[in-house]
Amino acid sequence: MNATTNIDHPENSSEYSGLTVNAGVSQPPIVNPYLKPRKRKPLPTSGELVEGILKGDVTTLSRAVTLVESLAPDHQSLAREVIEKCLPHSGNSRRIGITGVPGAGKSTSIDVFGLHVLRQGGKLAVLAIDPSSERSKGSILGDKTRMEKLSQHPGAFIRPSPSAGSLGGVARKTRETIILCEAAGYNNVFIETVGVGQSETAVHSMADFFLLIQIAGAGDELQGIKRGIMEMADGIVINKADGDNVDRARLAQAQYRSALHLFPTPPSGWTPEVLTYSGYYELGIEEIWDMIDRYFKFVEANGYFERRRRQQARYWMYETIDSELRRRFYDDPARAARISQAERLVLSNRLSPFAAASQLLAD
Ligand code: GDP
């Protein structure tokens, strides 16, 4: 060892004979200097992604969905290219929106519905819209354990809701993901949402069929749901019709049926049906799917299927314009200062809100 003696150390004085204290060794850097900095994996080209997606490669599909969800501008422009190229290969699935309050049995039911659909052949993508979602923060595991059987099926692609954000933003990403899944050959798409707020409208804007899962309560079934949600439903299914609950579920079914009579006929011309089932015991599942099959035959024959898809495409065009205009308006840092100044004037009654808005918009 060629360590030098530490001359300054007190214990090296003649007082302590027989003891030498060597100079210390300098602390090595925490970061290994020989380690090459890890380069960010280069982005694939849109052509590579599209090729993988069209082949049905799940890894490529997941990667493309991650790009759709990313906020990085280079990811977003790549995602846009991929979506454009996938668009001609999309559209050929049954898009089924599924909603219900937490605890209604959505996960249990989707697991069972999904397996039922997959037994008929083809593939199934399960997507979600949940703007408040905390579980969406990368926790695919959460969704996989929620739909235990389905997640092990090779024909199922389960993707949690895009990360929490504005409802419009989250919904748009889900809508774009549908396009990618369809291009990858998924001929069934479930879009799940928690039935507690505005998300139903978003799901309605991208689904062909809207299924509302309800449970029988203590005789006041109709109180909790907003009229608007019932009006959107193409089918209402009352879950947990098992054991002691069968009679209550039947009663709820009768109540929903009579309530639906009061509604005007929906634009599809289809009268929503009300069924009871048990997701847990897998009872009545076939009947639900028969109803959905009947619906698709009905709206394909009367032209509503195509009309609704066209209306949805138009809705998304305007929705995207709206959000892009808003983003450009608010993201300009120079304007942000003017906005807060105008806000102060409005709050102190020195400027009317209308004058403030028109001044800001005219800038
Ligand atoms: P989600 O919050 O809507 O996804 O509901 P879950 O699927 O997690 O179900 C909530 C609870 O209801 C769980 O404890 C399920 O086991 C139970 N559950 C779901 N479906 C049924 C059913 O058909 N019958 C009965 N008795 N319980 C069910």
Image (spheres, grey):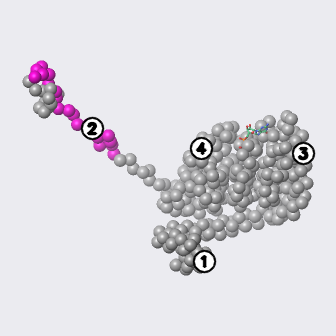
Q: Residue at x 81, y 58 (%)?
A: 227
Q: Are marks 2 and 3 in contact (CB under 8 Å)?
A: no
Q: Residue at x 78, y 62 (%)?
A: 305
Single out the residue that lies furthest toward the top.
Answer: 18
- Mark nearer the N terminus (4 vs 1): 4
- Mark 1 = which residue? 352
Q: Residue at x 68, y 40 (%)?
A: 147
- Mark nearer the N terminus (3 vs 4): 4
- Mark 2 = which residue? 28
Amino acid marked by disc 2? Pro
Is 28 magenta? The answer is: yes
- Mark 3 = which residue? 251
Chain part drawn in magenta? 15-36
Residue 118 seen anywhere in this rendered image of the structure: no
Of marks 4 and 1, the one in the foreground: 1
- Mark nearer the N terminus (2 vs 1): 2
Whole-Å distance between the Cαs marked 1 and 3?
54 Å
- Mark 4 = which residue? 140
Of marks 3 and 4, the one in the foreground: 3
Q: Secondary structure at mark 3?
A: helix
Amino acid marked by disc 1? Ser
Whole-Å distance between the Cαs marked 2 and 4?
40 Å
Number of other residues with Cα within 10 Å of mark 1, as a class: few under 14, some 14 to 19, many 20 or more: some
Quadrant including the N terminus? top left
